[in-house]
Amino acid sequence: AGVAIAEVPKLAQKDTYKVGFAQTESNNPWRIAQTNSMKAEAEKLGYQLVYTDAAGSAAKQVADVNSMIAQGVDVIFLAPREEKPLIPAVMAAKKAGIPVILLDRSVDPSLAKAGEDYLTFIGSNFVEEGKRVAEWLAKNANGKSKIIELEGTTGSSPANDRKKGFDEAIQAAGGFEIVASQTGDFARDKGRQVAEALLQAHPDADIIYAHNDEMAIGAIAALEAAGKVPGKDVLVLSIDGGKEAVQLVVDGKIAAVVECNPRFGPKAFETMQRYAKGETIEPTLVNEDKFYDASNAAAELANAY
Ligand code: GYE
């Protein structure tokens, strides 16, 4: 048996690179904005991009990474669908001498480490995003208190951390109750179905916190189908801040949204270039996120992705 090497593979300085980007799914505007940002930057630099879409399957995403390894890419950008199932892909790339940069979602920190197994994680602080939603409610809920939480994809780092940040801060605020918390898989129609069932079981719920815009938009459809007025009977809050959601803030149907910045291209490729130059890369590179509510949504609409 070989000795485990506690070091990320090196990256040579070259004029051009063949770079892999293993996307997790493409079923929402956030993913599409991220993919477009990666493709645009690769094109700008004249790098060859090997792009794959796992279509929501962690198993396919592992296979996608293995195929990139077989194709001899220089670097792999990976948006791991879930925290645990993508560990073998990270380890296989390391073993093949290919540095991995995690984009937007992370892997289980007890099973793979930044600076050892992969280079770094670039993305938002999801705990903070959940906390910002809770803090907005603590100030602005106006007596509303019974919360339905729509969680993202089970086992994904944004779902885990958006729940942790929100739940802790809402307990600390006092006076709120999470009456139900269930996954809607970050998807619009699943969010609608789950919200419909949970609203039937908890007709007195007056707040819906969705881990992303898509599920919030699904929940609004469920509320309207149940004869309730979003923004009046029930406050809806979400994370992502795409144009459609920011417009819904303008319309009064979403109360507040924390942006999750999907514009990864420039930072992703700059990080790989810094690494090739021999710079030490920080274990986490945090993206800045905006916040939208009735006070700024109209003015910010044009800037939303
Ligand atoms: O919020 C969601 C997407 O991983 C941060 O995944 C990302 C999340 C984003 O599908 O809409």
Image (cartoon, rainbow, N blue to C red):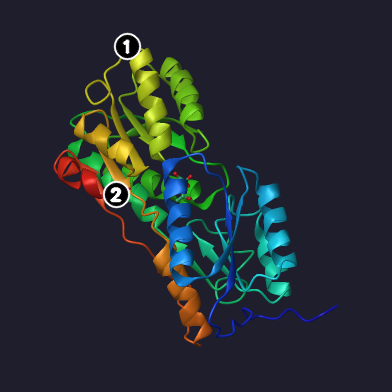
Q: Secondary structure at mark 2?
A: helix
- Mark 1 sits on what residue? 227
In the depicted view, which residue is nearer to us: 35 or 225? Answer: 35
Q: Which comes before the other along the chain, label 2 or label 1?
A: 2
Quadrant location of the N terminus? bottom right
- Mark 2 sits on what residue? 132
Q: Secondary structure at mark 1?
A: loop
Query: Is residue 41 in view?
Result: yes
Q: Residue at x 57, y 74 (%)?
A: 17
Residue extending farthest to the top is 227
Residue extending farthest to the right is 1
In the depicted view, which residue is nearer to us: 95 or 196? Answer: 95
Residue 88 is situated, as x and y percent measured from the top left of the image, at 71, 61
In the depicted view, which residue is nearer to us: 138 or 280? Answer: 280
Residues packed near mark 2 inside 10 Å, few (<14), some (14 to 19) or many (20 plus) = many
In the depicted view, which residue is nearer to us: 204 or 17? Answer: 17
Residues packed near mark 1 inside 10 Å, few (<14), some (14 to 19) or many (20 plus) = few
Identify whether 34 is placed above or below 284: above
Q: Residue at x 46, y 68 (%)?
A: 268
Residue 10 is situated, as x and y percent measured from the top left of the image, at 61, 83
Residue 161 is situated, as x and y percent measured from the top left of the image, at 45, 51
Identify whether 11 is placed above or below 38: below
Distance (Cα) linking label 2 and label 1: 29 Å
**Which mark lies nearer to you, 2 or 1?**
1
- Residue 117 lies in quadrant: bottom right
Residue 207 is situated, as x and y percent measured from the top left of the image, at 31, 29
Residue 269 numbered mark, or none: none
Horizontal arrangement in the rendering, residue 62 relative to residue 198 (left or right): right
Q: Residue at x 72, y 61 (%)?
A: 66
Kind of residue at disc 2:
Arg
Identify whether 156 is placed above or below 88: above
